Image: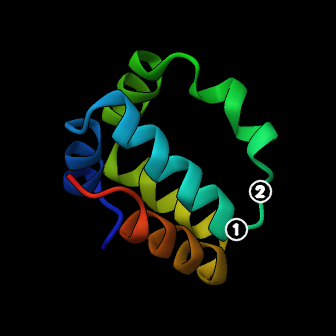
Amino acid sequence: MEINRKSLGELTALSDEELAEKIRSAARSCGVDASKTAPYLSDMTAVKKKLNSLSDVQIKALLSALGDENVKKIKNGLDNGTKR
């Protein structure tokens, strides 16, 4: 999975539970404890709104800040999370 506006749009088209599971899976892939992600997943409408609002420039900046290794882990988590 490439992370871009199109792929984020596909993620936000998932049900709230499917998207939450993909986010949890991506976080686990990076070694983030589930207790750290849970508070951010309580309002999936806000999560989807934020994901849909990101521009290509913002996405590239975020991916750059995360670094290649973390981006690979996130992609792996997203790819291996619950599928639609």
**Direction from residue 37 to residue 26 in the image, left or right:** left
Q: Quadrant of residue 54?
A: top left
Q: How many marks?
A: 2
Q: Is residue 54 visible?
A: no
Q: Which residue is mark 1?
A: 30
Q: What residue is drawn where x is 22% and y is 43%?
A: 9
Q: What residue is drawn where x is 55% and y is 73%?
A: 71
Residue 45: x %, y % from top left: 39, 17
Q: Which residue is mark 2?
A: 32
**Neighbours of disc 1 within 10 Å: few (<14), some (14-19), many (20+):** some
Q: CA distance from mark 1 to mark 2?
A: 6 Å
- Colouring of the image: rainbow
Q: Quadrant of residue 16?
A: top left
The N terminus is located in which quarter?
A: bottom left
Under mark 2, the amino acid is: Val
Residue 67: x %, y % from top left: 65, 75
Q: Is residue 72 visible?
A: yes
Under mark 1, the amino acid is: Cys
